[in-house]
Image (spheres, grey):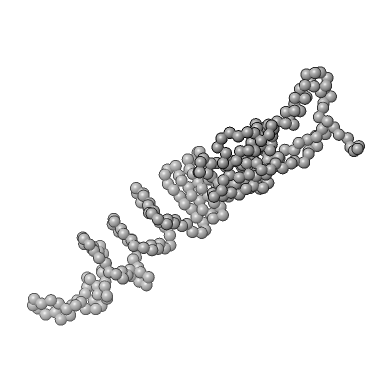
């Protein structure tokens, strides 16, 4: 037999009266058998992605139990606890608990071990236990660290911001109706295997970059204004298949038009004599 001193939970006035004794007995029964909610730290957690259902995790209470001397007792891990994730039907926000996360463990009134992903109707309780920590549900995200991937809904400005620090991409939807996409590194790709991509703006669309590459046929249904120099790969713009004008005129507001070393404004013709005949072809270099 151990000769270690063991202190109970009784107080000096516990048994002074029947009321004190009953109160002590009831309080001890509630504390030892009834659990409500408790802060825990996540240990292991299922990392089911978008192709898997909600999962389970283990967690350890962050507040220790104490003995009669108010010494902290080692915390015991709780295993196979279902964790909450925002989901309605087949629509979900996937944020699986990570080791070290703090969560709220809420104990169920009855043994809920018989309820799983495919449960549609009420089932018999697995045992007679009530408010047991083994039947807790984990609500993750309590007192979390500074996020690096986040969706921010700002109630003051009305803005919605989606950001991922790793790729340094930030997408903001402003209350004014503007959408802003920022990227400090990497590429932004919009891929559609079938169908169309439509950008509809009532005023204008501005694209600012060093180079724009259009790989495909280009159709412009409105006017085209080129304010800068128009150049090809090695000089002036080159139309290898020519220019076909279906209707209307081609108007040059200023400067000259040159083709095959012949200018439109200043070219001359050889072999011109007075009379009603046609001229020869324009002279090269004029």
Residue at image point 49% right, 44% down: 160
Left or right: 189 as drawn, with respect to 29 = left
Left or right? Give the position of 152 relative to 58.
Answer: left
Vertical placement of residue 250 versus 162, above or below: below
Q: Nearer the viewer, residue 18 or 243?
A: 18
- Quarter of image, res 246: bottom left
Residue 64 placement (x, y as % from top left): 75, 38
Q: Where's residue 262, x and y in %?
A: 24, 75
Visible in this render: residue 178? yes
Q: How many marks?
A: 0
Q: Which residue lies at the image location 35% right of the left edge and 69% below the top edge?
A: 232
Residue farthest along the left direction in this orientation: 275
Q: Is residue 124 above or below residue 258?
A: above
- The vertical placement of 50 against 13, above or below, is below
- Nearest the camera: 30 or 263? 30
> Of residues 73 and 2, which is closer to you in this image?
2
Residue at position x 24%, y 73% in the image: 263
Residue 41 appears in the rendering:
no
Note whether 45 is above or below 275 in the view shown.
above
Q: Quadrant of the N terminus?
A: top right
Give the image quarter of residue 273.
Answer: bottom left
Q: Position of residue 248 (x, y in %)?
A: 21, 60
Residue 67, located in which quarter of the rendered image?
top right
| Left or right side of 34 for 256 | left
* x and y percentages locating residue 70 in the rendered image: 80, 34
Compared across the picture, whether 90 is left or right of 251 comes to right
Dividing the image into 4 quarters, which one contains the C terminus? Answer: bottom left
Q: Which residue is pictured at 51% across the width and 41% down the height?
A: 89
């Amino acid at each position: 037999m151990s000769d270690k001193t063991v202190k109970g939970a009784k107080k000096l006035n516990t048994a002074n009266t029947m009321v004190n004794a009953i109160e002590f007995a009831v309080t001890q029964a509630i504390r030892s058998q009834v659990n409500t909610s408790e802060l825990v730290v996540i240990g292991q957690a299922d990392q089911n992605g978008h192709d898997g259902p909600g999962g389970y995790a283990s967690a350890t209470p962050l507040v220790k139990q104490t003995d009669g001397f108010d010494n902290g007792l080692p915390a015991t891990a709780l295993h196979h606890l279902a964790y909450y994730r925002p989901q309605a039907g087949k629509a979900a926000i996937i944020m699986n608990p990570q080791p070290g996360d703090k969560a709220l463990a809420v104990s169920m009134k009855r043994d809920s071990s018989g309820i799983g992903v495919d449960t549609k109707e009420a089932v018999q309780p697995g045992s007679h236990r009530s408010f047991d920590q083994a039947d807790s549900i984990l609500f993750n995200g309590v007192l979390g660290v500074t996020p690096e991937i986040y969706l921010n809904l700002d109630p003051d400005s009305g803005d919605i911001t989606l950001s991922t620090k790793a790729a340094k991409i930030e997408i903001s939807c402003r209350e004014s109706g503007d959408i802003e996409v920022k990227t400090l590194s990497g590429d932004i790709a919009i891929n559609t295997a079938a169908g169309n991509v439509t950008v509809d703006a009532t005023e204008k669309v501005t694209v600012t970059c060093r180079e724009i590459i259009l790989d495909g046929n280009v159709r412009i249904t409105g006017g085209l204004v080129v304010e800068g120099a128009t150049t090809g790969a090695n000089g002036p713009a080159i139309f290898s298949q020519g220019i076909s004008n279906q209707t209307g005129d081609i108007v040059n507001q200023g400067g000259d038009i040159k083709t095959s070393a012949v200018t439109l404004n200043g070219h001359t013709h050889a072999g011109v004599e007075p009379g009603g005949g046609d001229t020869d072809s324009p002279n090269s270099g004029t």
